[in-house]
Image (cartoon, helix red, strand yellow):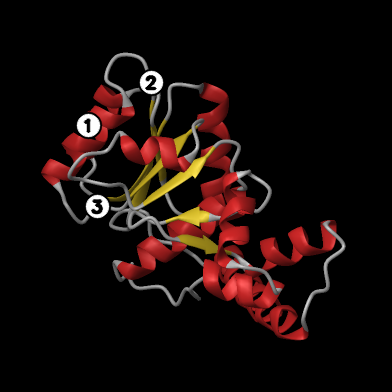
Amino acid sequence: MKRDIPEPVFLSAPKAATLCGVSRNTICCWIRDGKLPSYRTAGGKYLIRPTDLIGFMRDNSMFVPQTLVEIATEDERANQKESASFSTETRETSNEPSILVCDDDPNARALAVRTLERMSIPIIQAEDGFEAMHMLTKHTEIALVVLDLQMPGQDGMKTFTEIRKRNMSMPVVVVTGFPPEESEKAFGDYEPDLILSKPYQPAHLVNAANAFLADLGL
């Protein structure tokens, strides 16, 4: 069933640079140094949430332009409306989509599950790549996979490749302890929809999941 989910607002690196009054290269350096939170698309582009940019600028005593404040305020309103709809919605659980979280670390897996439970959507768990593929076979309603990259046995890389061979359109969010640039080098012809570096902000995972499911019309 299609839900009316507001899409999260992202700023490109050039747009963020313009708002900060710095060069695009400076923005990219802040991101690569881990100072400015960001998303990294499969195409290699950096995307930044306006609230993250404001937080960074204030932490570094930079002037925050009113235009950026207005963008962030509008994004927050959308998120609040989204949270309210999730808290009051009565969901059907028999035929609705679900999310698969695969991580061998029970603490990391529990964090991802608690984070995604905000969406009031069924969460299926797997401890390794073999179990993840079993769950994907058993639960055809799975519409999104959150996959840890480093796991014993069948690791996330091989699992991701198998997922792509079975379903090219399945959104996959890869979670890794390595910087996105290093992780991307390991992928061949197929690339994940998003790479999140640990420790990631819970809001990043929720917003990304919402956006991917909305793109699928769910």
Left or right of 64 on screen, residue 98: left
Residue density around tag 1, few if under 14, some if 14–19, many if 20 or more, within 10 Å: some
Q: Quadrant of the N terminus?
A: bottom left
Q: CA distance from mark 3 to mark 1?
A: 13 Å
Whether the residues at callouts 2 and 1 have beta carbons within 8 Å, the answer is no
Q: Which mark is residue 151?
A: 2
Label annotation for residue 170: 3
The three-letter amino acid code for the residue at tag 1 is Met
Q: Residue reaching furthest right? A: 61
Q: CA distance from mark 2 to mark 1?
A: 14 Å
Asked whether 69 or 204 is in front, the reply is 69
Q: Position of residue 43 (x, y in %)?
A: 33, 58
In the picture, the disc for residue 38 is: none
Q: Secondary structure at mark 3?
A: loop
Q: Position of residue 99 (x, y in %)?
A: 38, 47
Type of the residue with mark 2:
Met
State the image coordinates of residue 216 (x, y, percent, origin top left): 29, 66
Q: Quadrant of residue 190?
A: top left
11 to 116, vertically: above or below: below
Res. 9 in view:
no
Q: Quadrant of residue 84?
A: bottom right
| Among numbered discs 3 and 2, the one appearing first in the sequence | 2
The amino acid at mark 3 is: Met
Q: Which residue is mark 1?
A: 133
Identify the secondary structure beneath mark 2: loop
